[in-house]
Amino acid sequence: MKSEKVRVITAKPSFIEYWKEVFDYRELFWILAKRDIMVRYKQTIFGVLWSILRPLISSLVYVFGVNKIGNLGANSEIPYILIILPGTILWLFFSQSLLNISLSIVTNNNLVAKVFFPRIIIPFSSFFLGLLDFLIGLIVFFGFSFYYGLFPEIKIIFTVLFVVLAYLATTGIGLFAAVLNVKYRDIGQLIPFVLSFGLFISPVLYTTDKVMGDWTYNLYVLNPAVGAIDGLRWALLGEHAQFNWDSFIPLVVFCIVSVFISIRFFRKHENSFVDYI
Amino acid sequence: MSVIEINNASKSYVIKHKLNKGNTLRDDIVNFTNSVFRGKKASKKELFWALKDINLKVEQGDRLGLIGSNGAGKSTLLKLLSRITAPTSGEIKITGRMASLLEVGTGFHPELTGRENIYLNGSILGMRKYEINQQFDNIVEFAGIQKFLDTPVKRYSSGMYVRLGFAIAAHLEPEILVVDEVLAVGDADFQKKSIGKMRDVSKSGRTILFVSHNLTAVESLCNKGAFLNKGELIDHGPIKNVINNYIQKVSSFKIKQEWIDISDAPGENGIYAKRVELTSDEGLESGIQLTTRIPLKIEYEFWNDLEGANLNLSVFLYSMTGECIFNMANESQSFSKGIVSSEFRIPGDFLNDGSYFISLMVVQDGLKPLFVFDEALQFDIHDFRENSEYLGKWPGAIRPMHLKVKSWQKELAE
């Protein structure tokens, strides 16, 4: 007999027990993430090339569209693709992670209904896919930036901070959506719809200084994607982008509050998933 | 030492009887606003106790068989023990690691290969990576999939799929193993392996929880039993006592019906039922377990109000699913007013195990049905086997053991 540990099952497990158990299952966290990554490009011809094609094609289409429709890019000092790319890869990370987290419980319903493990591992592990794409997108960005002779400054290390913040913001929204989606599948319909709006209210196709001075600006900065994209541009574009406290502070506040509340919300409902799924 | 201790565990579900049907957010909002602004009740709530105040201790090394009819709460109890859902109240203490074969192959991803799925599934079931590495070869050998290790499991046959799933779960080396109806799957050879594995597990002093509808299998594998009915624990203790108790209390026996007075008796067109009874030559005491071996006798009597009528009195035997297994009748003959008595024998080793019901029919002149007595008798026949390693359901509607299969060696022709 190895583990003589006594496990007590009650209606409400204690806080410490809960996180200890999540830690015990850390291997599963990696395994599920690995599964999502391995499965993703099975039976495709282009395979992992898709991770390069997606941000690249989106950015090229945006650059083309923006050049044709508005003159948003006319006064920038650097090639427009360098401004569009960070926004695009962060937006793809944000939207993809949000979608994956929201649907994660329902898509893994065979696991949820049959075996026990801390449910929160499922949404936590489902952002890896987006992270991988983000890293590949960064490589694409550096390709372009070296080509145009723009070399990163030391503040590039803050990239990590903004990815983490973007991830936390996604988790904050995503956990709510994941729980609600168990009972109301409407959420699965709603999220892609909301994301298609989000593209226009976030600085993906434009930069934040285009909105500054407008009366909508105070509302605009409340969008957590704004803070994350502004921050990433600042970290990547050297002297060509300014740090924006207006969007950074709302982002940090949003992350702390939403993650805290949504994890509580998730814990409250996770034991009843199987009864509704 | 008790490895499982269940104290007052209950699980309830709220069943909503919706007055306005629907299951989307929109419907809930409409119902909510209706209930707030118009005082209309959107739904009627009812509390359903799937398990109520269960108290049970399982000692280390016990092989506990959970028995009960469908809906008794067996699966809910297993779900609580394996922590898939939490109890509404009460607590359960479990010592040691528990693995369940509730649903083998859980979490297999069809696109991944057998090898990848062993790691995936092992982790999901709570194995550490080094443990999987240790057991890897045993798992592959047990499942018999050496050749297909690098084939995606979506190309596996269903048998291979189940075998692999079972092999992984069986090699978890849990202190407590939960087995639910796995005997229903796989071929004889695989079942033999599975039962062997379960015996190994129990010999090494570990605990098994076993759920099956097959009482023979439960009786041969378990030493303790727990009998659940409608969410309550009716009885627990040595397996023999529990099974006997179960048979007496639950089986839907209707082996005798009798009417003293013709005015109460069911019937029409001058034919009224008087007595119908299932017995055997030795007589059946109530609560006895009918097995496939026991020869049965069906006796039935009707009051006949028709003078000189030509009557056929026939017996229909139906399986529980409503298929007619056979219909036999006497030769048409003339009866005068009074009581018509019949007797029909079913030899032992003829019917398969299962639930059956019997209907009777009286026909005049070979074509005019006078009276159909539906579901006159109802009984269960339990499995009986000797010298058989196979414990799965014996297939077929009947089991005519006297029809022997003869086999012999044939020389190869030069």
Image (cartoon, rainbow, N blue to C red):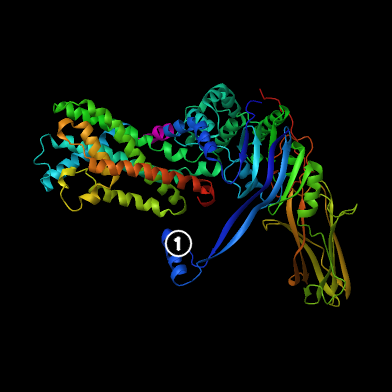
Residue at left offset 26%, top offset 31%: A138
Q: Within the magenta stretch, is there residue A37?
A: yes
- In the shown orientation, is residue A180 left or right of residue A143? right
Question: Residue B61 location in percent, x, y?
Answer: 73, 32
- Using the rendered image of the protein, determine whether residue B336 is visible from the camera's viewpoint: no
Residue at left offset 62%, top offset 49%: B89
Chain letter for mark 1: B
Question: Residue A273 location in percent, x, y?
Answer: 51, 48
- In the shown orientation, is residue A187 left or right of residue B145? left
Residue at left offset 62%, top offset 32%: B97
- In the shown orientation, is residue B385 left or right of residue B70? right
Q: Which residue position is annotated with label 1?
A: B28
Asked whether B341 or B102 is in front, the reply is B102
Asked whether B280 or A140 is in front, the reply is A140
Question: Residue B39 location in percent, x, y?
Answer: 48, 71
Vertical relation: B322 (above or below) B111: below
Vertical relation: B287 (above or below) A91: below
Q: Which residues are magenta?
A: A34-45
Vertical relation: B369 (above or below) A117: below
What amino acid does circle 1 point to?
Answer: Asp
Residue at left offset 32%, top offset 31%: A48
- Using the rendered image of the protein, determine whether residue B341 is visible from the camera's viewpoint: yes
Q: Which quadrant would the C terminus of chain B be assigned to in this image?
A: top right
